[in-house]
């Protein structure tokens, strides 16, 4: 008699929801993986003749970050050309409807002979100057992406305290100028009070301002910076409806319901220190030469016959666990009620097994 029953497609449901855990780190949190790196564009010739022995760098937890190559990587991925940018693009209070929010410029490649130039386009809120500070957040904390609108940076490296936040569209601004920032229009010819950008899916914050905010994220110590944000993670709730009809699962494998046992077992006199903290401490197996018959090295062998009470009309089984198996007969999950549930022959039972995964 089988203890298994197939589930129909209608018995299985999957739903999802997002959770947003809040995190707060400082530049002095050892081992967090949150760190800042200053970057600079240097010169084309300096990049072409790059040497690790003389290159400007910063070492963090044994890893060396070179300022010039990191700058060009950040520039290429997020700033250089609107056609290849990662993250939010063209945001000044939403997607601009005209070219007024787009900056066109000519980029010259001096490494080619002769020099070549190309016209590039980027939004005004994406301005990477000669230097910047990059704050990196580990994916183990931000999950799938940083929740837009949740980033806050508090920098106390100077005499003035800066409190910066993101606008939910990838731009960092100073909360001291919230009103003027909110009044920006798509016809602005500059970025207003935008002092940097956040790239939610990559866990990167870039402070691009080269004026008053140029030190944000660059200094370390007790008067450094604090970064706060909310992670985003999708949780999948799986629900399985397991139904037992009338007269189903009226079968037990409980050893106490079997007869036909034989054999004997010898329990040594106490103290039995030789068995302490071993599997034989609670049950003496045949491997020690102390058991015969049904008691062997694998434990107790059940008899082949059932007790008479199991054939009585009033006999009923109790549900103590529900297992979910795949098509390969592999047990994947187990659900247990808080107490055994009597499986009356005349009644149908329905159990809902629910658990979350990510």
Image (tube, rainbow, N blue to C red):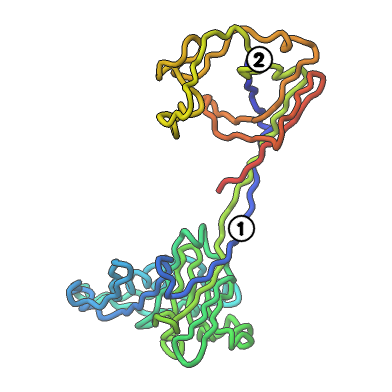
Query: In which quarter of the view is residue 233 placed?
Result: bottom right
What secondary structure is marked by label 1?
strand
Residue 216 left/right relative to 47: right
- In front of the other: 328 or 77: 328
Query: In which quarter of the view is residue 315 placed?
Result: top right
Residue 222 left/right relative to 340: left
The residue drawn where x is 61% and y is 30% is 323
* Mark 1 / mark 2, whichever is N-terminal: 1
Q: Which residue is mark 2?
A: 257
- Residue 218 pos. (x, y %): 39, 81
The mark closer to the camera, 1 or 2, is 2
- In front of the other: 243 or 112: 243
**Mark 1 Cα within 10 Å, few/some/many (few <14, many 20+)?**
few
The answer to whether 298 is drawn above or below residue 172 in the figure is above
- Residue 56 pos. (x, y %): 25, 78
- In front of the other: 206 or 100: 206
**Mark 2 Cα within 10 Å, few/some/many (few <14, many 20+)?**
some
What secondary structure is marked by label 2?
helix
The residue drawn where x is 60% and y is 76% is 93
The residue drawn where x is 52% and y is 88% is 161
On residue 77, which mark appears?
Answer: none
Q: Which residue is mark 1?
A: 19
The answer to whether 130 is drawn above or below residue 352 in the figure is below
- Residue 97 in view here: no
- Residue 298 pos. (x, y %): 46, 19
The answer to whether 315 is drawn above or below residue 271 in the figure is above
- In front of the other: 299 or 35: 299
Residues at badges 1 and 2 in contact (C-beta under 8 Å)? no
The residue drawn where x is 55% and y is 62% is 231
- Residue 142 in view here: yes
């Amino acid at each position: 008699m089988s203890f298994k029953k197939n589930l129909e497609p209608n018995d299985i449901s999957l739903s999802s929801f997002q959770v947003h855990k809040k995190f707060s780190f400082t530049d002095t949190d050892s081992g967090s993986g949150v760190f800042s790196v200053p970057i600079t564009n240097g010169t084309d010739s300096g990049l072409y003749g790059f040497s690790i022995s003389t290159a400007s760098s910063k070492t963090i937890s044994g890893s060396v970050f070179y300022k010039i190559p990191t700058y060009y990587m950040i520039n290429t991925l997020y700033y250089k050309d609107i056609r290849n940018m990662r993250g939010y693009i063209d945001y000044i209070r939403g997607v601009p409807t005209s070219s007024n929010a787009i900056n066109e410029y000519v980029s010259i490649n001096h490494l080619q002979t002769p020099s070549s130039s190309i016209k590039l386009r980027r939004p005004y809120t994406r301005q990477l100057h000669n230097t910047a500070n990059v704050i990196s957040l580990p994916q183990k904390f931000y999950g799938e992406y940083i929740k837009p609108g949740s980033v806050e940076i508090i920098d106390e490296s100077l005499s003035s305290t800066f409190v910066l936040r993101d606008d939910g569209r990838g731009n960092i601004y100073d909360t001291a100028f919230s009103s003027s920032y909110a009044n920006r229009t798509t016809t602005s010819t500059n970025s207003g009070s935008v002092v940097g950008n956040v790239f939610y899916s990559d866990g990167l914050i870039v402070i691009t301002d080269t004026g008053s905010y140029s030190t944000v994220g660059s200094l370390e110590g007790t008067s450094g910076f604090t970064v706060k944000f909310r992670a985003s993670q999708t949780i999948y709730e799986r629900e399985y409806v397991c139904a037992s009809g009338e007269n189903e699962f009226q079968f037990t494998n409980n050893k106490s319901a079997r007869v036909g046992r034989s054999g004997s077992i010898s329990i040594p006199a106490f103290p039995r220190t030789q068995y302490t903290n071993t599997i034989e401490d609670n049950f003496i197996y045949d491997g020690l030469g102390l058991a015969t018959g049904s008691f062997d090295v694998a434990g107790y062998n059940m008899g082949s016959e059932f007790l008479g009470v199991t054939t009585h009309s009033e006999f009923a089984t109790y549900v103590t666990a529900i297992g979910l198996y795949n098509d390969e007969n592999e047990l994947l999950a187990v659900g247990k009620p808080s107490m055994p549930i009597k499986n009356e022959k005349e009644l149908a039972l329905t159990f809902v097994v629910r658990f979350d995964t990510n």
